[in-house]
Image (cartoon, grey):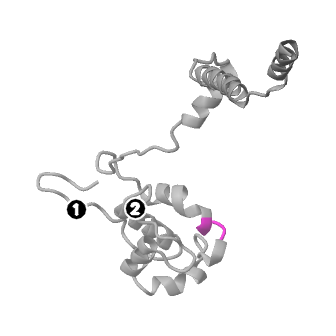
Amino acid sequence: MSEKHHQEGHAGSHKKFNPLLVTLVLALVLCVGLVSLLKSSHEPVSHSAAAELAQAKRLQKVGSVEIRSNVDRPLVNGEEVYKGQCAACHATGVSGAPKFGDAAEWGPRLGQGFDALVQAALKGKGAMAPQGGGNFNDLEIARAVAYMANAAGANFPEPQPEAKEGESAQ
């Protein structure tokens, strides 16, 4: 009987399933996998030139601020302001802009007076956006208004800066 008991005991030990042992082995494999994954994600990766260029493009600045002073530059005359800012619409009459030199189109506007024309240019009117605060200062915009109005038959003097003591106007 002892031999039978011995065989049963031996045979039983092979048939038993040990869930604790399986759980420990799986946990160990999982830990080793996680550690290797975390370690590899923190190692420096060598970048190719294309990858560095792509990163530089993603990080490049989007815009810039430029501080300009209209005080330190000489004033621009009316003709140059017209060419630089006004001619895009007034040369062809885009969106109802009175064409340069067309007395019939400018006539009713000239009747409003020079100051009204300048304010319309600075603040905008109809389809024309405000011109004040752009590339030219208000005096230069007024000079362009005088230039355009005079080409259509007005006789407005080109506006001059206020002279400071001891200085002459430009």
Q: Nearer the viewer, mark 1 or mark 2?
A: 2
- Give residue 161's position: percent from left, percent from top: 27, 60
- Give residue 115's position: percent from left, percent from top: 36, 78
Give the labeled residue for mark 1: 162
Report the quarter where the N terminus lies.
top right
Relative to 128, is 39 above or below? Answer: above
Relative to 135, is 25 above or below? Answer: above
- Give residue 103's position: percent from left, percent from top: 57, 79
Q: Amino acid at mark 2?
A: Gly
Q: Amino acid at mark 1?
A: Glu
The label number, if any, that marks residue 133 in the structure image:
2
The secondary element bearing badge 2 is classed as loop
- The extreme top residue here reads 3
Q: Which residues are magenta?
A: 89-93
Instruction: Residue at 60%, 83% (x, y): give it.
Output: 104
- Give residue 73's position: percent from left, percent from top: 33, 46
Viewer can see residue 102:
yes
Instruction: Residue at 88%, 17% (x, y): give it.
Output: 4
